[in-house]
Image (cartoon, helix red, strand yellow):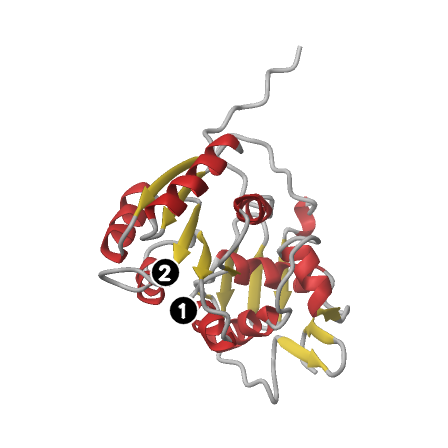
Amino acid sequence: MSSPAPEFPPARVLVVDDERSLATLVGTYLTQAGFAPSLVHSGPEAVAAAREQAPDVVVLDLGLPGLDGVEVCRQVRTFSDCYILMLTARTHETDKLIGLSVGADDYITKPFSPRELVARVQAVLRRPRPARPGTASTSAFTDKDTVSVVGALRIDHESREVTLDGAPVALTRTEFDILAVLSERPNLAWSRRQLIDEVWDAAWVGDEHIVDVHIAHLRRKFGDDSTDPRFITTVRGVGYRMGRG
């Protein structure tokens, strides 16, 4: 008789918004969806809670007292690779790009439906995660292809570790997920929409240039020149593929 599957605690979601009624409403929806939310209402509280609670996802408002969402995101990224979903009441493209530039994984513009936000949280948590100690791997890779090597770049899909010339490269979860998709089929040119479907969710709606921002982060961390890339090549009129152009 097989043993029952291990039960894991609900994913922890830190909700950071100075609109207390909105934060409470979001927390209620997250609880009903089976998550374990906690609520804070200022920038300094957010950094402290992220450090203490080690959340799986942070839902982070851009406009906060004490520290704004951009600075909170910047500080959290120094010690956590949790998914960060940025909330903003601003519709200007620059505000979204600033949040992404400091390490946010995704954004949603106010006003939004709490159900939409819960769906976004569910989508990021459906992404592949490293196997927990003592559990069987659910990776689609076999033992012989759990590692991709592109020149001096080594991508371990099981441990979600990346090294360049033997030195570790710190990536956010979204950056790793994009890299993993590209490296699984290195000769395939992926469009922005295909990468969004694979990494975010097929139901994701927003500016597809979010992919370009994360690709730029990867290139910067690899010391790559977009005009002569070693690892991620722009395929004009299509999107991106792995490998030198």
Query: How far across and how far down the image is residue 99, in percent?
Result: 43, 68
On residue 102, which mark appears?
1
SS under mark 1: loop
Q: Residue at x 26, y 54 (%)?
A: 42
Q: Amino acid at mark 1?
A: Val
Q: Nearer the viewer, residue 32 or 90?
A: 90
Quarter where residue 27 is shown: top left
Q: Residue at x 70, y 57 (%)?
A: 197
Quick check: 25 left or right of 114? left
Question: Farthest top residue?
Answer: 1
Q: Amino acid at mark 2?
A: Arg
Instruction: Give the residue at mark 2.
Output: 77
Q: Nearer the viewer, residue 90 or 118?
A: 90
Q: Quadrant of the N terminus?
A: top right
**Contact? badges 2 and 1 (CB < 8 Å):** yes
SS under mark 2: loop
Quarter where residue 62 is shown: bottom left
Q: Quadrant of the C terminus?
A: bottom right
**N-term mark: 2 or 1:** 2
Query: How far across and how far down the image is residue 169, in percent?
Result: 45, 65
